[in-house]
C-alpha cells in the first residue's frame, strides 16, 4: 500500500501492453468532474434511499437542525467539521479493507486530493470483489449503520446528517458500479492503470 497526495497517472506504455494482452478499456468518464456531473441522478436516489431507511427506524425532521416554519438558524461547529473528516477517512478505509492483500500490495494507493480521499488499486481483482470494494462504504454507512444505531438508540441528528452526507458522496461509487455491471461480463477480472479501468475474461 502506498500513501500519496495525488492520484496515480495513466501509464501509456502499460495501456498498450494491456490492450495487447486482451484487456478492454471500460467506457467511463474522462475525469472526476464529468463523473460527478453524471452521477447527480444517483446522488438523489442514494440520498432518498438513506433518508427513507432512517425514517423507518427513527424520527426525522428539519427541526432537529434548527429549521422551522418561523425561523432558520444554521451554525457550523468545528466539531461537525471533525466528524466530516472522520467520515471521509472511514469511507476510504472501508474501500481499502476489501482490497485483497492491501497491506502488502505495492499497486494499491491511498491519498487525499482537493476532491476528497481516494483508494485505487492496480491489482487484478474479480468483478464480484470489485463491486464489493466499491459498494462497501455506501452499504455499510448509509444503509446498515442507521439500522444498527437505531436499535441501540444512538441515531443522533449529527449521525443522521453524516449518514445522509455519505449517501450523497457515494454517488460516483454508484456510477462506477453501474458502469461495471453494464459493461463487464461475470467472472471477469478488473484492473486499473492509474484512473483508467480495464476488464478481461
Image (tube, rainbow, N blue to C red):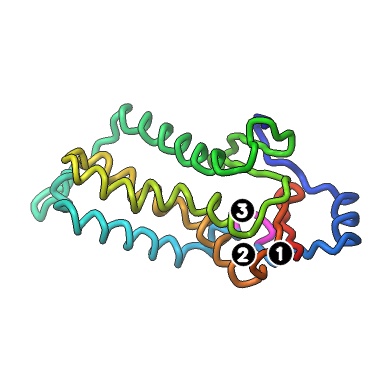
Does 184 sit above or below residue 95? Answer: below
If you read the primary sequence from the N terminus, does the residue marked by circle 1 or circle 2 appear first?
1
Judging by the rendered image, the residue that carries numbered circle 3 is: 32
Residue 55 percent across, percent down from the top left: 20, 57
Does 46 sit above or below residue 144? Answer: below
Judging by the rendered image, the residue that carries numbered circle 1 is: 26
Residue lying at 16% horizontally and 40% vertically, measured from the top left: 153
In the orientation shown, which residue stands out farthest toward the front? 187
Give the quadrant of the C terminus. Answer: bottom right
Q: Residues within 10 Å of mark 2 (few under 14, many from 20)?
A: many
User: Is 32 colored magenta in this rendering?
Assistant: yes
Q: Secondary structure at mark 1?
A: loop
**Between tags 3 and 2, which lies in front?**
2
Give the quadrant of the N terminus. Answer: top right
Q: Residues within 10 Å of mark 3 (few under 14, many from 20)?
A: few
If you read the primary sequence from the N terminus, does the residue marked by circle 3 or circle 2 appear first?
3
Considering the whole magenta stretch, tell me its main secondary structure: loop
Q: State the image quarter where residue 127 is shown.
A: bottom right
Residue lying at 58% horizontally and 60% vertically, measured from the top left: 176
Tell me the distance, in whole angstroms, between the alpha carbons under discs 3 and 2: 17 Å
Question: Which of the pair 13/114 is nearer the observer?
Answer: 13
What's drawn in magenta, residue-wise?
29-33
Amino acid at each position: 500500500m502506498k500513501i500519496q497526495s495525488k492520484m496515480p497517472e495513466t501509464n501509456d506504455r502499460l495501456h498498450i501492453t494491456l490492450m495487447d494482452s486482451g484487456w478492454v478499456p471500460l467506457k467511463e468518464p474522462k475525469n472526476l468532474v464529468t463523473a460527478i456531473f453524471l452521477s447527480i441522478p444517483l446522488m438523489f436516489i442514494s440520498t432518498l434511499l438513506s433518508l427513507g431507511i432512517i425514517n423507518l427506524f427513527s424520527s426525522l425532521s428539519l427541526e432537529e437542525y434548527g429549521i422551522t416554519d418561523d425561523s432558520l438558524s444554521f451554525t457550523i461547529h468545528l466539531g461537525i467539521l471533525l466528524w466530516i473528516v472522520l467520515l471521509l477517512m472511514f469511507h476510504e478505509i472501508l474501500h481499502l479493507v476489501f482490497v485483497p492483500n492491501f497491506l502488502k500490495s505495492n499497486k494499491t494507493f491511498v491519498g487525499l486530493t482537493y476532491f476528497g480521499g481516494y483508494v485505487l488499486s492496480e491489482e487484478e481483482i474479480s468483478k464480484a470483489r470489485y463491486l464489493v470494494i466499491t459498494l462497501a462504504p455506501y452499504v455499510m454507512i448509509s444503509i446498515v449503520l442507521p439500522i444498527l444505531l437505531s436499535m441501540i438508540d444512538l441515531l443522533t441528528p449529527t449521525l443522521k446528517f453524516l449518514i445522509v452526507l455519505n449517501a450523497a458522496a457515494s454517488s460516483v461509487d454508484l456510477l462506477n458500479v453501474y458502469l461495471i455491471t453494464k459493461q463487464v461480463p461475470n467472472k471477469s477480472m478488473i484492473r486499473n492503470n492509474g484512473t483508467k479501468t480495464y476488464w478481461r475474461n
